[in-house]
Every structure is written in C-alpha cells, then in structure tokens.
Image: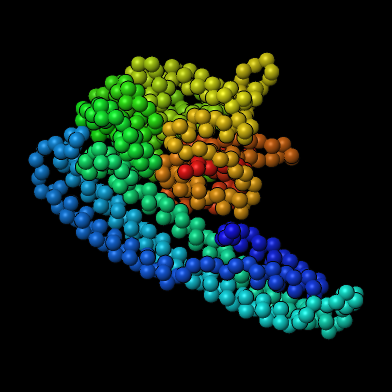
Amino acid sequence: MTESTTDRRKRLAGLRGSISGADSKNDLIDAIDDALGVAAPEGDPATIEALGKRCRGQAEDAMKVRDRSDAVSRSGLPAVWVGDTSVLATTAVDAATRAAEQMADALRGGGTALLALSDALEAAQTTDGAGRTKLRDARGQLGDKDGFFDTWHEDDGEEAARKKARALATTGVDELYDAAVAADDAARAAARDLNKYAAEARAGKLGTDELTAVDRLALADTSNVGGDPEWNEILSANDLERSGRAMEDLSPADRTRMEQLLAGASSPQEKAYLMKALASGHSVDDVETFGGKIHGKDPLWLQEHLAPVTTEADSMDDEGRNPDGSNTNTDSQGFEGQGWTQGGDGQEGSCVASSTVTARAMVDPVYALELTGGPSGQENDAAAFRERLVDEQHRVHEEGDGDHTHFWTDVPDGMDNDGKTEVVNKEISPHTGSGYDFKEVKSADDRRDVLPDIERAVAEGRPVPVGIEGYDDGDRSGHAVMIVGQEGDMLQVYNPWGTTTWISEDDFVDGGMAKASDNDLPDAYAVHVPQD
C-alpha cells in the first residue's frame, strides 16, 4: 500500500525525535535507517508542469468562446424561446457566456494549482535529496553496529564520533521532514483546488440527452437572488449529476411530464428548484405536487422558503473575534425572523438532530417547504415554522436514540456518534446519494488527512457533519456543526445556533473551531465523510 503524504510527515516527525535523542550508536543507526526507509516525495514535476501549462492554454481558448458569446449577447437578441423547457434566447446566451467564463476560470485555476504543485514538488525533492545525502554520510561515519559487549562502554572518542554523526543526521532528517511537510501541503492544496474547479465546471454535470444543451446551461447557471450568485447556485454539482441520471431513468410518460413542468415554470429559479426536487430523489408525482405549491412565486419567496442557508457577498471578510472567541462576522440563517436554530432558541441539546434537519433541508427543497410553508406550502408564519422545526428536530433526536436531560423529560441532551451515523444516513444520504462513514480525527494529522475528502464533498454540494469539543478541568463540552461550503483555503460552517461563518483550513486542523462556536469548543474530534 502506498504511504500517504500525511503518513510520511507523521513518521518523519517521530524520527526527528528518535535521531536527535539517540544516546547510543546502535539506536542512532536504527533511527537513520528508518528515516532513509521513508519514501521520498513522489511525482514528476516536469509532467505536472506540462499539464498545468496545457490547462492555461485551454483557458485562453475558453475565454475566446466567452468573448464571442458575450458579443452575441450584446447584439440585441429577439425575445424568443429555445430549448425543451422554454428558455429565453437571451438567458441561454448569457448562460453560455458565464459557462465559458467558468470553464476558463476552472482551467486557469487548475493550471495554476498544477504549476504550484510542480514547483513545490521539485523544491521538496531537492530538499529531500540533500537530507538523504546527510543521513547517508552520517550512517557511513558510524560504521557497523556495536556488538553486545561493545555496547557496555563508550569511550570519549566513540562518544564524540556518535555526537558528530548525530548532529549531521539531525540536520538531514529535519530536511526530510521539511520536504515531507512541503509535499503534503502542496498535494492537499492542489487536491482542494482541483476538486473545487472540477465542481465549478458545472454545465457538463447535467449529463442527460433528455434536455437540450440550452436547457442544461440555463439550469446550471441559476442562482438565488440574495447573496453572492456564485455562492448561492440552486443546483450543486451533485444535484446536476443526480438530476441528469434521474431524467435518463424516467419512463417516457414521466419524462414528458417533467419537461412540461419545467417549460411551465415562471422563473429560472422555479425551474431549478423543480430539478433539485428530482435530484433529491422525489418522484415526478412528488415534483408535480411541489411544483403546484411554488408555481408563480417570485425568486425571493423561493429563496426564503427553500434555501435554509444564504451566503452573503461579504461573509468571508475577517472582522475579528468576539470575547468568547467566535467570529464577529456571521450570517444569521432564518425564516421570517426565526432562526434555523436548535430548539428554536439555541438552548436545547439537540445539535446533532438540528444540524441534520437543516442539512437535509439544504439538499431537499420539498422537505424545506414542508418546514417553512407548512402542509399548504404557502405559510409565512415564524411561530408555525418554529413549531414544525422543533418537532422535526425532536423526531430526528429520537431516531438517533439521543439522550435527555432527565429520564422523566423529553428535552434533548446530546447524541452519541452511533446515533449521529444513523440519522445522517437516514435523513441526508437518500437525497444526496452518498452514505456517511464515521471517522475520528483526534489529532492535527488526522484532521489534515481528512480535509481533501471534506472539501471535495462540500464543493460538490454534500454537507459534512463535524463533531467539536473542548475540556475545562477535565469536564468535556461537545457540539455538532456542519461544513457546507468551501472557497480556497476557507470552510463555511453552519452552527445550529442559527448561523454560518467561515474558518480556515488551519483553524480546522489546529484547534480553531471556536471561531464557528466559542472558546469552549476549539477542537474537531469526529467527521462523517460522504462516500461515493
């Protein structure tokens, strides 16, 4: 089995201590041999560089397409309908322009990521090579291992020789470690960026011949009207793939009904939510019923009722910390003034159930409307929403066999990891197509190792549950949050206290989760990772 970059980093971190602390010749020889046995950073920088440059060249080609499409858009198109689902020609051309621009950005960004990886890998291999030379020289200075009787005594000359070799070996293993850290960081950064750019090349995700290219472009391009359009696209990459497969699997009669529903939609947003309902696993009958409830509603109404999380354009601004360690800059997430909050007011210990309910509502608009709009789908009542939300949080808490504050009450008071695994797989997985596996991440290395899986999942539109904790004089506090977005080296965290905020990768790895909660909860200790 190939050793991961994180495993190499971890092994060399331990061997640094073994070499610098070796107080016998034989221990030093063993530690040097172990260090030399750790694989060097792998990969061909020249090949990676060539791929990066090719991506850059393709980005220029995509921008030429973008410029031509933009020129058509500005030429005064007639107000005609195109495609199977009645897309305005102007909308289609604008979507094509943005799709070409997204493709160019993805290729340019992917090329940049590959070139950065090439440079970092080449430098790491050079550093690693220099360190191995020092380790081999130190090993040569030591000669053969001492025999049993030789280990009983070390004269002054032998001690001086050992210390000289140890000093050289210490420098050498430090260079191996530095190279492993650089290669690990570069590999994770490249994986993060490439996964993100792959998810953002959206138009091709809706892989069905049952809709025209125009329809697919328009659907992939549609965002909610509030917040930054790029961060509030209605159909995630995962939604686009699942809805395309669902269209392919429909019977001819159901496919015709679905196309008619899409063609009759009163706005691009309404159309996108119909497809999102199909993507989340609902039948055409269910989508038709849902469509009847949202038909003719303006885009703002749709966002308020169907999107539990809206990401504001300034949400990533660093505005400092509150006295409790939390980010000052947070986005409150609610409906009609009532937050998507555990227990309705943030006081109950139903964080697992509450984050699960909100995550499901993010990926299943039919479910979201049941909570916000009630049975009719038409309500705009904060108190009624709160009652339904809390009832649903309690249902999911019982589903996961959660604890209660006292045996005679039904007030939630936490849920163990087995229960959490059960509820996320029952409530979220059917609507994303991905089962969740539990993974402990008690150390910085564990958290660093799982980051690429988290970032890939959220870039594609699959929320990732995270358990966080803290200790005060041995007393543990625990909480459940959900990672719901990623941009560069930043992660967007939904806290069931009713807010979202952004933290850095380093915050996640190195005990900075207080920024998304408070100082009592600094460390991520567990993650439920979506599986393909």
Whether 444 is drawn above or below 282: the answer is below
Q: Nearer the viewer, residue 120 or 309?
A: 120
Viewer-side residue, 332 vs 231: 231
Q: Residue at x 42, y 72 (%)?
A: 46
**Of residues 241 and 490, which is closer to you in this image?**
241
Position of residue 192 measured from the top left corner of the image (x, y, whole percent): 46, 53
Question: Quick check: 427 above or below 383?
Answer: below
Q: Is residue 469 left or right of residue 197?
A: right
- The reply to whether residue 324 is in sight is no
Q: Quadrant of the N terminus?
A: bottom right
Task: Say whether residue 436 is visible.
Answer: yes
Image height check: is 2 above or below 295? below
- At which x and y percent is residue 239? 37, 38
Q: Residue at x 18, y 38 (%)?
A: 83
Q: Residue at x 85, y 77 (%)?
A: 147
Residue occupying the far bottom of the picture: 157
- Quick check: 314 left or right of 103? right
Identity of the residue drawn at 44% across and 68% down: 118
Residue 34 higher or lower than 440, as above or below? below
User: Which picture quadrant has residue 158?
Assistant: bottom right
The x and y percentages for residue 169 are: 69, 75
Give the side of residue 495 with respect to residue 106, left or right.
right
In percent of width and height, residue 152 lies at 90, 74
Q: Quadrant of residue 5?
A: bottom right
